[in-house]
Amino acid sequence: MQALYPDIKPFRSHHMAVEPPHILYVEEAGNPDGIPVVFLHGGPGAGLSPKARCFFDPERYRIILFDQRGSGRSEPHACLENNTTQGLITDMEVIRDSLGIERWILFGGSWGSTLALAYAQCYPERVNAMILRGIFLCRLRELNWFYCEGGASRIFPDYWQDFTEGVVRRDKESWIEAYHRALHADNEVARMAAAKAWSQWEARCSTLRPNHDIEEGMTSPHAAVSMSHIETHYFMNGAFLEENQLLKNMDRIAHIPGIIVHGRYDMICPLENAVEVHRRWLAAELHVVRDAGHSAYEPSIADALVKATNDIADMFDDVM
């Protein structure tokens, strides 16, 4: 099994001003002359982990990572103003142009896969290849699966009970609407409790086997606040995409080579998402990981992702 590459430090970091009031944290790691790849984190709002640099051979890749609007070390923290999918796509173009990159590889999981597909469909000429994990298309059916009774709640009824006790739902409110309201209430203690309950539900469902480190990281105050606020903001607005938009526009990127990695027991983003994308993206390979759920840091998922980055590097070593 292929492990993650050893920890590395960035060789350069930036604070890039984009659409006000946002200032993005951007870093570069690996080989300055290597194959450009951009890492797109999940959530939206989850922010970067130092381990995100470790999916790539640092001798072969120029690794670009950034905290999306309101996430991680970007400022203002958890800011929802001008925080849209279209804004993030524009940010990626600002980063690419500022760093002097003509074309790059997209690497994204969960929400990162959503953003990668949306960006590629806008700028296919800027994308050499894509490596996507845990495909999330942000359709109503997917939100209903994870945030309504009858989907993931039936697989994790004990975790779901904790989630539903995190806020008080009013008549006819969905759980997303109830959490969105609670996260913007006047009571700071109640807001933090709601943020942690929202993030804990996702963390607990993200791995096939319980992982305390992942749960602890996602429910830390800094991460929980940004993820809960930004996710509910995006989900209340349909991720600022038309329903089924990404599948409808797959013809725009059907020629781009790629690798899809998806855990068979992904309870956050069901495997059918990856199958539907692959049917429309014949230039991509689909790798179903038989003993994993959603998280990129489960051993079998990490193994498949590292193999994928090596395979893509082999494809482009001689042409970059």
Image (cartoon, rainbow, N blue to C red):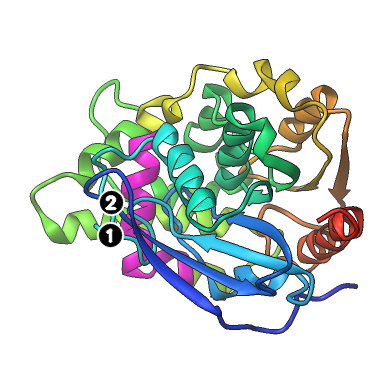
Residue for badge 1:
75
Residue 258 part of the magenta-drawn span? no
| Residue in front for this viewpoint, 29 or 164 | 29
Residue 22's mark? 2
Above or below: residue 9 compared with residue 218: below
Whether residue 95 is visible = yes
> On the picture, is 205 further left or further right than 77?
right
Whether pointer 2 and pointer 1 mark residues with C-beta atoms closer than 8 Å, the reply is yes
Residue 218: in magenta span? yes
Q: Position of residue 98 (x, y in %)?
A: 47, 54
Q: Is residue 20 left or right of residue 258?
A: left
Magenta stretch bounds:
217-234
User: Residue at point 68% right, 60% down?
Assistant: 296
Nearer to me, 98 or 46: 98
Q: Residues within 10 Å of mark 1 (few under 14, many from 20)?
A: some
Please name the residue shown 21% across and 44% down the image. Answer: 182
Q: Is residue 150 visible?
A: no
SS at mark 2? loop
Locate residue 78 relative to residue 301 in the image: left or right: left
